[in-house]
Image (tube, rainbow, N blue to C red):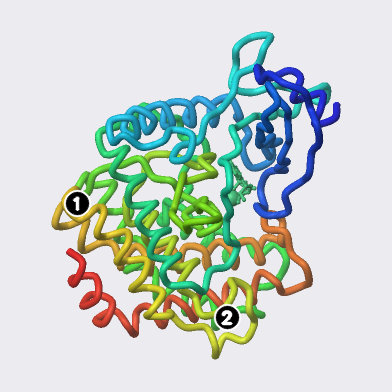
Amino acid sequence: MTVRDICSEFNIGGKYISCAELSTGNINNTYQVRFLRDGEEKNYIIQRINKSVFTEPEKVMENIIKVTHHIRIKIKENDLSTKKFVLRAFRSKKDDQPFVIDDVGDYWRCYRFINNSITYDTCEDLSIIERAGSAFGKFQNYLGDFDASELHITIPNFHNTITRYEAFHQAIEKNPYRRVSKVKEEIERLCAFEEKAVKLQKYLDDGQIPLRVTHNDTKCNNVSFDKTSGQALAVLDLDTVMPGAIAHDFGDAIRFIANTCIEDDPDIEAVKLDLAKYEAFTKGFVSEVKDALTELEKSTLNLGAFAMTVELAVRFLTDYLNGDKYFKTKYPGHNVDRARNQIALATDIEYKMEQLEAIIKKYF
Ligand SMILES: Nc1ncnc2c1ncn2[C@@H]1O[C@H](COP(=O)(O)OP(=O)(O)O)[C@@H](O)[C@H]1O
Ligand SMILES: [Mg+2]
């Protein structure tokens, strides 16, 4: 089936004009489709959901419908435009579902395209980083009174650092590809981080911090911005919305946005935490959420930055030990470079912890 065929199965009126694949995003296949309706151009996003990552697409869509419904009510209460500030999923003509299944069993969805919007894959501009922080903070606030247990766990133990470490130790023990000896130093470093890195999960398991609705993919290209005014609009990419700790969202955003290098840069001497970017994101995020957090939660945000960075290093190295099966690799040892990069970042986060605590305090 073509994208045009898929469109015809959704309840969207008008005449199809054209379709272009968007190259941004690395999980799903995303297309921008143009329609003409009553003399006016209407744009939609059509996405094929990646079934190898999301094995239960119906549950993913159920989560998205619930969460966007809740946010839409909040947006209306705040007299904001629901066309700009929240995703809207269209339903199928045939059975009124928020997806269409094609002839080979793939799931497709259709969103309203947020007009005149843009996303940034990399972000150097501090004011944009601050606005991304505040968009993710607002997302938290809109969902602050949503019962997280209503959501499906679409990827079990996604940010469970304890089980990630268990898988790591298993890979070391089994050593199926005889690679342990090649990464002795990295293994030692990650083992030394373990006690501190799993603390956040322990707080969650012990009920010391609340389970909240978390986005779980807080990259800057998952926030749309108005092309003209630069204002942050809707938070996109809600596939991984699940129950979690607020420090997961804050920490993963810092890990991604405030690294001085890209995630797999092998020049690990250059990998540092950029304090200016850290502060910009923190300012945006914390200014939004500060009144909603418990005292313990506040103290976990920087721990989250450390834990999310270490967790990803653990995942990269586990995948290397198990034969590079999960992450797409471009060359042998790609996962080792990625792990080293994240270890270097975690080391710098730990080194700068006092400075980070001082910065975060300013915004609480
Ligand atoms: N409703 C939308 N309006 C405008 N652009 C969108 C919309 N949804 C997605 N996009 C664009 O498509 C890109 C990829 O979509 P996303 O849902 O983030 O997929 P992935 O999971 O592959 O990252 C986004 O970064 C954004 O540029
Ligand atoms: Mg995305």
Near-viewer residue (113 or 41): 41
Question: Residue farthest to the bottom?
Answer: 269
Q: For the residue carrying disc 2, how many other residues have a C-alpha within 10 Å: few (<14), some (14-19), or many (20+)?
A: few
Give the residue at mark 1: 293
Identify the mark at residue 255; answer none if there is no mark: none
As drawn, is 231 to the left or to the right of 263?
left
Q: Amino acid at mark 1?
A: Leu
Q: Residue at x 28, y 46 (%)?
A: 205
**Secondary structure category for the residue under label 2:** helix
Question: Residue farthest to the left?
Answer: 295
Q: How many marks?
A: 2
Near-viewer residue (309 or 185): 309
Occupied quadrant, residue 126: bottom left
As drawn, is 263 to the left or to the right of 249?
right
Q: Residue at x 26, y 54 (%)?
A: 288
Question: Residue farthest to the right?
Answer: 1
Q: Residue at x 54, y 44 (%)?
A: 237
Q: Amino acid at mark 2?
A: Lys
Circles 1 and 2, Cβ within 8 Å, touching? The answer is no
Give the residue at mark 2: 184
Q: CA distance from mark 1 to mark 2?
A: 40 Å
